[in-house]
Image (cartoon, grey):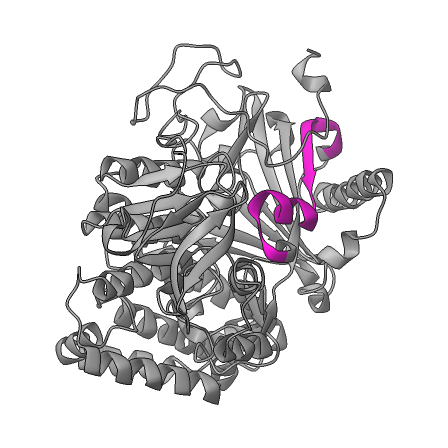
Amino acid sequence: MPPLAARVHASPLLAPVIPTARPAARLRASSGPRGGGSVRRGALASEKPAAVAVAEKAGEDRGGEQSPYDAIVVGSGIGGLVAATQLAAKGARVLVLEKYLIPGGSSGYYRRDGFTFDVGSSVMFGFSDKGNLNLITQALKAVGRKMEVLPDPSTVHFHLPRDLSVLVHRKYEDFINELISKFPHEKEGILKFYGICWKIFNSLNSLELKSLEEPLYLFGQFFRKPLECLTLAYYLPQNAGDIARNFIKDQALLSFIDAECFIVSTVNALQTPMINASMVLCDRHFGGINYPVGGVGGIATSLADGLVEKGSEIRYKANVTNVILENGKAVGVRLSNGKEFFAKTVISNATRWDTFGKLLKDKELPEEEKNFQKNYVKAPSFLSIHMGVKASVLPAGTDCHHFVLEDDWNNLEKPYGSIFLSIPTVLDPSLAPEGHHILHIFTTAGIEDWEGLSRNEYEGKKEVVANEIIRRLEKKLFPGLQDSIVLKEVGSPKTHRRFLARNDGTYGPMPRGKPKGLLAMPFNTTSIDGLYCVGDSCFPGQGVIAVAFSGIMCAHRVAADIGLEQKSPVLDAGLLGLLRWLRTLA
């Protein structure tokens, strides 16, 4: 093999190097050389291909009264794994079916030449040890897991038009003082806007978060915390951009708030529900951004291990092609190899487009899904670049996360217009060979820009677009970046579609126009009895903390429906009817 400095190649992005199995479930050190084949400190929480991969049995697992499973979960993204583990912790028997070789979806990992790459975002919300919105911590705890984390002193460093530079410090006071120093004439407006964010966050953080579709839970929370519930109800149909404009007039500052929302939702503030914005704009200071030792992929691996220890199962290379219906009820799934599995309920962690367009392709699209697709379109995918670079190219004190929009605010939402960069080795050097760093670069891209190309054209285009992105980062942040690269892999929207089973590579829904907050977002139940959805195309939307919330809500609702949680059928029917009516208004 050529020396590390010479290995710049284009092996398939996201295709992992699967480590050999070993039983250890805790992070542990290794005496092996850095960059070699042995596992160093910070290796993923489980070095098995993923949890305990159960061998497929011949024949069928028949549902109904004798069903061995209370729930089948299609897909092992964070939303699906949180739903599965929450159910398993309540005593349910769950089967998770994952198409790929490892769990996690876009929160997975892969390895190349001594580098451990996060597939998706390295910015981890909901990973603190306090409050009720530390949803990743709670999900791990439910199955007896805890991960070592590294606190990030900042969330992101913005590099914006007209040389506007804003560092989002971990400490709220430091961030707000820096922002006011850039816009002193808008001090009052800044304090009022972010003050409302805190009002919403504190209301959310005071509640025990469960399914908003379960009336006994809702009434219980309302009687215990009426003011907080009324606060959330008031802001539920509102968007961050409208509220910001009530207090702020400076267009550059409003554009900055657009960028704040964009890195969470891939849309501007006028299209971002205020509740979503408040969750992340405050949690980054309340609990802080905390990076899991060994990489983000350890979260999914730990959840999968915990699931198995609770007596449930996860199977890999299990490609679900159909949801099986009997008398209009979801009773099981069929795999691409013809095998069938049955359960009392089916939870789809696929996008709603995949769920109703592929897994239920022979069934007419339900009316509420027509309404969803009328209100929302697929958010764009990404061009992603994973690189190993020489450590010398990064100045001392380089921040972990950066957002770059150099010249024109109008380019914020355009394909390839803005760049998000993570350097997780700033926090955890064990992810790379000694003397090297990882750069993980994202920029939005539509799949239509990558269709209809020959193989040579496709590979050539990836190289041209990636080199232009690298050139921009070299000019703005890191002179000499191009020459420092020792490993580079580029993924297009087609890559994300192929390896992550994302419809057209999308990472969730995007409102067609200006939405009424979160009113139009579908919840976990569907119009098909026994079928539930979880993930970023359900309330409350995109982002790790949001899909974890979706998983917790889904598990609570399913548990109530199968008798593991108390429910009221009369109140239940009334609440579901009200929620569906509200979505038609939106």
| Residue 469 x, y percent position in the rendering | 74, 46
Comparing 337 with 129, the one in front is: 337
Q: Is residue 483 magenta?
A: yes
Q: Is residue 133 magenta?
A: no
Residue numbers of the magenta segment:
482-503
Q: In which quarter of the image is the N terminus?
A: top right
Comparing 251 with 24, the one in front is: 24
| Residue 77 x, y percent position in the rendering | 44, 48
Who's the residue at 56% across and 59% down the image? 354
User: How many numbered discs, if any?
Assistant: 0
Comparing 334 with 91, the one in front is: 334
Who's the residue at 51% across and 42% down the image? 99
Q: In the figure, 209 relative to 86: above or below?
A: below
Q: In the figure, 211 relative to 474: above or below?
A: below
| Residue 347 x, y percent position in the rendering | 39, 57
Q: In the figure, 448 relative to 62: above or below?
A: below
> Picture quarter containing residue 505?
bottom right
| Residue 384 x, y percent position in the rendering | 65, 45
Left or right of 349? Residue 11 is right
> Picture quarter containing residue 378?
bottom right
Who's the residue at 24% across and 78% down the image? 572
Left or right of 415? Residue 74 is left
